[in-house]
Amino acid sequence: MAVFTVTPDVSDMVTLQECSALFRETGHPASETTLRRWIAAHDVRTEWEERVSHRWVARLNRDIGRRQSVMVVSFTEMLRVHKEEIAKRD
């Protein structure tokens, strides 16, 4: 008999800025610099994602899109790392 595993197609990848903002709400904030240090120490896998930021330029009377690559990381993995690092502090 075959067993099927349903895996939702949901990504929990967040930027370091988003991750830092989410940890700020926990009462145990972590800056982007701290997150980078934790990523290196715990060998957390990161990816680079291309994003487009839009900005209205009045003198040109149009929207200017700027492409940039941003580092993204699994929020689930960072939650695990955050828990371990906070436990070490206490």
Image (cartoon, rainbow, N blue to C red):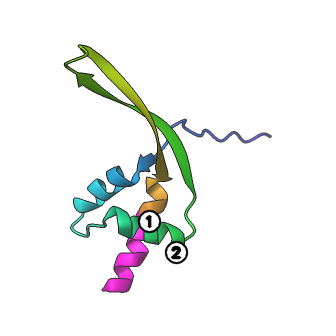
Residue 87 is inside the magenta segment: yes
Q: Which segment is the magenta one?
A: 79-90
Which residue does the numbered mark 1 point to in the structure image?
A: 36
At a point 31% along the width and 58% down the height, the residue shown is 20
Residue 19 sits in which quadrant?
Answer: bottom left
What x and y, as percent, mark residue 2?
A: 78, 39
Query: Marks 1 and 2: CB-CB under 8 Å?
Result: no
At a point 30% along the width and 19% down the height, the residue shown is 63
Q: Secondary structure at mark 1?
A: helix
Which residue does the numbered mark 2 point to in the structure image?
A: 41
Q: How many marks?
A: 2
Q: Quadrant of the C terminus?
A: bottom left
Amino acid identity at mark 1: Arg
What x and y, as percent, mark residue 57?
A: 24, 22
- Categorize mark 2 by other alpha carbons within 10 Å: few (<14), some (14-19), many (20+): few
Image: 85 above or below 79? below
What x and y, as percent, mark residue 17?
A: 33, 52
Residue 39 is inside the magenta segment: no
Whichever of callouts 1 and 2 sits on the residue coming sooner in the sequence is 1
Amino acid identity at mark 2: Ala
Q: Residue furthest right?
A: 1
At a point 31% along the width and 67% down the height, the residue shown is 30
